[in-house]
Amino acid sequence: DAGITQSPRHKVTETGTPVTLRCHQTENHRYMYWYRQDPGHGLRLIHYSYGVKDTDKGEVSDGYSVSRSKTEDFLLTLESATSSQTSVYFCAISGVSGGMTDTQYFGPGTRLTVL
Amino acid sequence: DAKTTQPNSMESNEEEPVHLPCNHSTISGTDYIHWYRQLPSQGPEYVIHGLTSNVNNRMASLAIAEDRKSSTLILHRATLRDAAVYYCILRRGLTGGGNKLTFGTGTQLKVEL
């Protein structure tokens, strides 16, 4: 299994509080991604990173920010959590081989509940 | 981005082959066909991918239509552990680009004894 951990695995918080989710990898892969998954939807990309301090928005980035200060860590921050951000959050990583981005490996997920 | 269409659910008996279809009529010439699956309470995992030719690996086979407008993921002998949501995803083949995957709702595969 790819070395990806997410913390915390479960979190309950209140509306309006800041929340930071952490994704940590031991694979030294260049790309890292944050997705959210809600009932009735597939995974939707929030933000991704293509290198240290290099990030870009995904499909559902409103209300989220990210940071990547070192290769192994990718942080997802909800500045002021809302109930609509209750979801399961998945981190993923991918490397590069043969000049093309490799397949993605996913972490175990973080279940976030915003009351 | 080109979209894929999959049945919402399929059922199979254990140890029988399973053919999971995917339609992608607007696929472009540089789109790779990827399959991921998601077991209950886990993150997705890569299954297989291909461009034009059929592909085999230890998990499954991928059959790609000659016109590339459809593909089929084949599980040769389904087990209870194969019960999962299977996602067919088109990924633009970019050199050095980000691997942004667009997930649909996939096919829920149920495997019965």
Image (cartoon, helix red, strand yellow):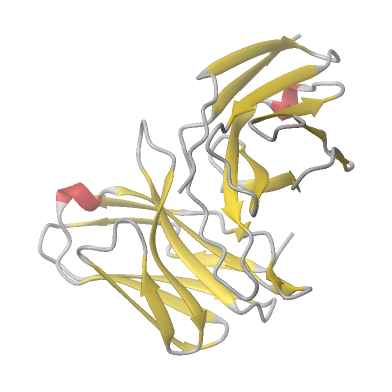
**Residue A114 visible at all:** no
**Residue A86 visible at all:** yes
Residue B17 on image: x %, y %: 83, 16
Seen in the picture, residue B35 relative to A76 is either above or below; the reply is above
Which picture quadrant has residue B66?
top right
The answer to which of B59 and B83 lies nearer the viewer is B59
Seen in the picture, residue B55 relative to A71 is either above or below; the reply is above
The answer to which of B65 and B60 lies nearer the viewer is B65
Q: Residue at x 17, y 61 (%)?
A: A81
Which picture quadrant has residue B15?
top right
Residue B78 on image: x %, y %: 80, 21
The answer to which of B32 and B7 lies nearer the viewer is B32
Seen in the picture, residue B97 relative to B29 is either above or below; the reply is below
Q: Residue at x 50, y 19 (%)?
A: B8
Residue sitting at the far left: A16
Seen in the picture, residue A32 relative to A59 is either above or below; the reply is below
Q: Could you tell me how many numbered marks the image carries?
A: 0
Residue A14 on image: x %, y %: 15, 57
Q: Residue at x 56, y 48 (%)?
A: B43
Direction from residue B32 to residue B2 in the image, left or right: left
Direction from residue A107 to residue A80 in the image, left or right: left
> For the N terminus of chain A, which image quadrant?
bottom right
Q: Residue at x 57, y 33 (%)?
A: B24
Residue A38 on image: x %, y %: 35, 40
The answer to which of B82 and B62 lies nearer the viewer is B62
